[in-house]
Image (cartoon, helix red, strand yellow):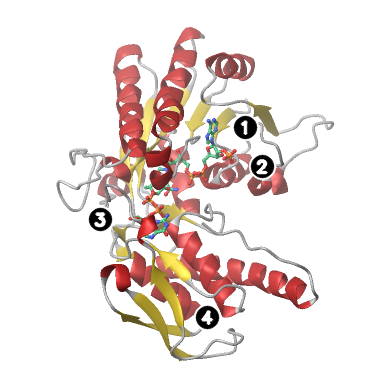
Amino acid sequence: MQKKALITGITGQDGSYLAEFLLEKGYEVHGIKRRASSFNTERVDHIYEDPHTDNRNFILHYGDLSDSSNLIRIIKDIEPDEIYNLGAQSHVAVSFESPEYTADVDAMGTIRLLEAISLLGLEKKTKFYQASTSELFGDVRETPQTETTPFYPRSPYAVAKMYAYWICVNYREAYGIYACNGILFNHESPRRGETFVTRKITRAIANIALGLEDCLYLGNMNALRDWGHAKDYVRMQWLMLQQDTPDDFVIATGVQYSVRQFVEFAAAELGITIEWQGSEEQEVGIIKAIEGNKTLSLKVGQRIVAVDPKYYRPTEVETLLGNPAKAKEELSWVPEITLQEMVEEMVQVDYDEAKKTAILKDHGYDINISKE
Ligand code: NDP
Ligand code: GDR
């Protein structure tokens, strides 16, 4: 029997990679997309199947995690074997500006799905994956963090995800639902949203190299993160639902770098060496050396990075470092893509995109580059 999966957040970074992965495994993949005033399926357009064809394996449904009746209807119609709850207001900084909405979608959205499974009597059929996060560790109590490290969330996003974590554990214990938390550390890719720090960096460095932007403005460059590749991490999401018993796992690389180092790595991909001057709010990144021919008109001594305190968060998560030993031991999972490979891929994709923009600009088109 062909398995059916339902993915919330299918239009996001992870949703798109997971959909590809499950299609390759032969699944019928259903996804929930939000109604928007313009097309919002860019990340899955390459696997989109015309609704007029028969025997489709990729099917999108309009819906929203804030709408119980919609979720119940979709789950009733599909009766999925697996639900991957990846949908969320996933930006930590934005959660300070929209705390109630974040709680509604990230916390309540999770219980709405679990209740739907329960109300429809699918406890024994439908397995549930919850996109939990290293943000739960927040103000870290021990390093590296494991499945037993105490939580100390530091944002409305993390607090909402903490509710989701525990309600998932509770429904597993109370109703025997096969429900798992993947406590995933930061994972990135060329499909990462443009306002998360890694993509913001690779995109800006590519634009700066081609003269499309002058300066990359960042917040806390001392923040340390354990960055992996989204492709490696969605494989793990599936693996967690293929076991005999449900459990929770930390997924990480076990290596951490600072935001400042990530800038250096990205710049180095285009032959730029950066020297740092000043400190805290006055810190700037100056070009120390340039190699190769990937930059247009940059000059040694030019300032291309600066701190803008508006990107500081009311409460910051300074350091995160995961220990994925349990995933390695019990699920034989190890990340396959290194940080250097990932940075190379991200910079290359953004550089190619910047080249197209530069050509249009050269031909007189009025180009506006979205920034945040
Ligand atoms: P993205 O922000 O790229 O994608 C989020 C998805 O959720 C998008 O498809 C978005 O739709 C959808 N969504 C947002 N609000 C709603 C809503 N009200 N109802 C239905 N869908 C909604 O996130 P990622 O792919 O990076 O992350 C996937 C999940 O994993 C998230 O839950 C995130 O919190 C969690 N996570 C991510 C980590 C990471 O490093 N990437 C690490 C740990 C956890 P739209 O496209 O319309 O905006
Ligand atoms: P994070 O990712 O908050 O860890 O959440 P993000 O890339 O937004 O920030 C990482 C660190 O970089 C610092 N930072 C900046 N961040 C952004 N976005 N923009 C800046 O200009 C900037 N300057 C410095 C931040 O302060 C932070 O310390 C991500 C999301 O995917 C969550 O959904 C997920 O749960 C966690 O990762 C694990």
Q: Disc 2, disc 3: CB below 8 Å?
A: no
Circle 3: residue type: Glu
Look at the numbered disc 3 and give the secondary structure of its residue: loop
Q: To which quarter of the image does residue 359 belong?
A: bottom right
Mark 3 lies within 8 Å of ligand 2 (Cβ measured) = yes
Percent across and percent down for residue 289 are 44, 91
Upstream in sequence: badge 2 or badge 4 = 2
Upstream in sequence: badge 4 or badge 1 = 1
Circle 2: residue type: Asn
Upstream in sequence: badge 2 or badge 3 = 2
Residue marked by disc 2: 40
Mark 2 lies within 8 Å of ligand 1 (Cβ measured) = yes
Q: CA distance from mark 1 to mark 2?
A: 8 Å
Q: Nearer the viewer, residue 15 or 337?
A: 15
Circle 4: residue type: Leu
Upstream in sequence: badge 1 or badge 2 = 1
